[in-house]
Amino acid sequence: MKALVFHGPGDRQWETVPDAGIQDPTDVVVRIDSSTICGTDLHILKGDVPAVKPGTVLGHEAVGTVVETGSAVTTLAPDDRVLVSCITSCGRCRFCKEGHYGLCVGGGGWIFGHLIDGLQAEYARVPFADTSVHKIPKELTDEQVLFLADILPTAYEVGVLNGGVGPGDTVAVVGAGPIGLAAIMTAKLFSPARIIAVDLADARLDRALEFGADKVVNNGVEDGLERVKEWTGGLGADVAIEAVGVPATFELCTEIVRPGGRVANVGVHGHPATLHLETLWIRDVTITTGLVDTFTTPRLLDLIAAGRLDPIPFATHRFDLDATMEAYDVFGDAATTNALKVVLSAEPVEAELPKDAVHAGAVAS
Ligand SMILES: NC(=O)c1ccc[n+]([C@@H]2O[C@H](COP(=O)([O-])OP(=O)(O)OC[C@H]3O[C@@H](n4cnc5c(N)ncnc54)[C@H](O)[C@@H]3O)[C@@H](O)[C@H]2O)c1
Ligand SMILES: [Zn+2]
Ligand SMILES: [Zn+2]
């Protein structure tokens, strides 16, 4: 089979690898129908995630069809269409029993494209299949559910729910990439009074308005703190969601939040950020961090099925699965291509582009 293999920092290849097969009785093998690329894959390619060993197949987001089941699998059968999410759950450890699948200590958690071979491939082995995959209702397309594999539950759980977004809140989302935009989309489920998006890129702020932000500020041009204060009667935001992952944006979140407010950090940080306790101690601010657990995936799937959430606008570019190398180039150059999420399809991609797919090579084949 073919797969996208990590060969060390800066080195990736779409190449032939041994076929995925059952190793444990709780495994299934899935034919990948649709997959996508995450910013975390770019971090891996930069060498930021040393746990990923050269030779690993990348990818942790996919929709696929079960082709083989291990002897202990009881709820899945060949031909079942499933969402394979970034988080795997052993179903037995203390954290899995509490719904904290991201913290699984029984062999699950974030393993695809990290500790085991991932999902940017023609086939993949899926461990702990009964307790990890989600069956997909027939009426939903691959693209409608694909982004439930990571960005939607991440933004919803680690941003919106940890931040305690409620009716009437002012929510400031710092960073308007896929995660920030998904936070805007899912914050709206709680009827906040206003959502403010903060980013350095005007193109991303335009997307934020399309995804439901009420106000935007380019903090490379204007003072983000001053604008948020101006829009909140001088108080600051009830909830600040950090969706970038650099010290400056975490610190900005702790400044733009009102006294008594909540900072929900979603960004993956590679460097220490300063926690200004000398100003925060007196302001009753709550700060949360987290890795996605994906306990809300069934709820989000139901919201999509009910037409309350529409994830399709995240799909800016579509490629055939065997054009994954080119898809990485486009996704990795988002400043030029305006890519949000690329969809990799096993079925040949139709020669139709979403209105804003700007890259001429976006339909490969
Ligand atoms: N906690 C989790 O479980 C989890 C899961 C997935 C991703 N993440 C993390 O979430 C973060 C966001 O992911 P993404 O895919 O949307 O990333 P992205 O890089 O596509 O988007 C980040 C956005 O932040 C903006 N930005 C950069 N510096 C800024 C600054 N100083 N001020 C304001 N905006 C700035 C960029 O212009 C960009 O639009 C990343 O750190 C990612 O690793 C966390
Ligand atoms: Zn991811
Ligand atoms: Zn577990």
Image: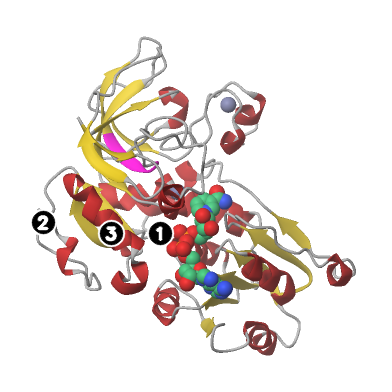
From the viewer's perspective, is the residue at label 1 or at label 3 nearer? 3
Of the residues under marks 2 and 1, which one precedes in the sequence?
1
**Which residue lies at the image location 28% right of the left edge and 52% below the top edge?**
143
Residue 176 visible somewhere in the drawing? no
Q: Amino acid at mark 3?
A: Asp
Q: Which mark is residue 204?
A: none
Q: Earlier in the sequence, mark 1 or mark 3?
A: 1
Name which residue type carries label 2.
Glu
- The residue carrying mark 1 is 309
Which label is found at residue 329?
Answer: 3
> Would residue 150 be found to the left or right of residue 83 on screen?
right
Q: Residue at x 85, y 70 (%)?
A: 283
User: Is residue 96 toward the left or the right of residue 12 in the image?
Assistant: right
Q: Residue 103 appears at what percent x and percent y?
A: 61, 35
Q: Which residue in the protein does label 2 denote?
A: 350
Q: Residues within 10 Å of mark 2 (few under 14, many from 20)?
A: few
110 versus 68 height, above or below: below
Disc 2 on helix, strand or loop? Answer: loop
Q: CA distance from mark 1 to mark 3?
A: 29 Å
Please identify, in this view, whether the residue under mark 2 or under mark 1 is nearer the observer. 2
Snapshot quadrant of residue 266: bottom right
Q: Residue 294: within the magenta?
A: no
Is any part of residue 83 visible from this angle?
yes
Stretch in magenta: 60-64
Which mark is nearer the camera, 2 or 3?
A: 3
Alpha carbon distance from label 2 to label 1: 24 Å
Image coordinates for residue 118, horizontal then vertical, percent: 36, 35
Q: Secondary structure at mark 3?
A: helix
Q: Nearer the viewer, residue 33 or 195?
A: 33
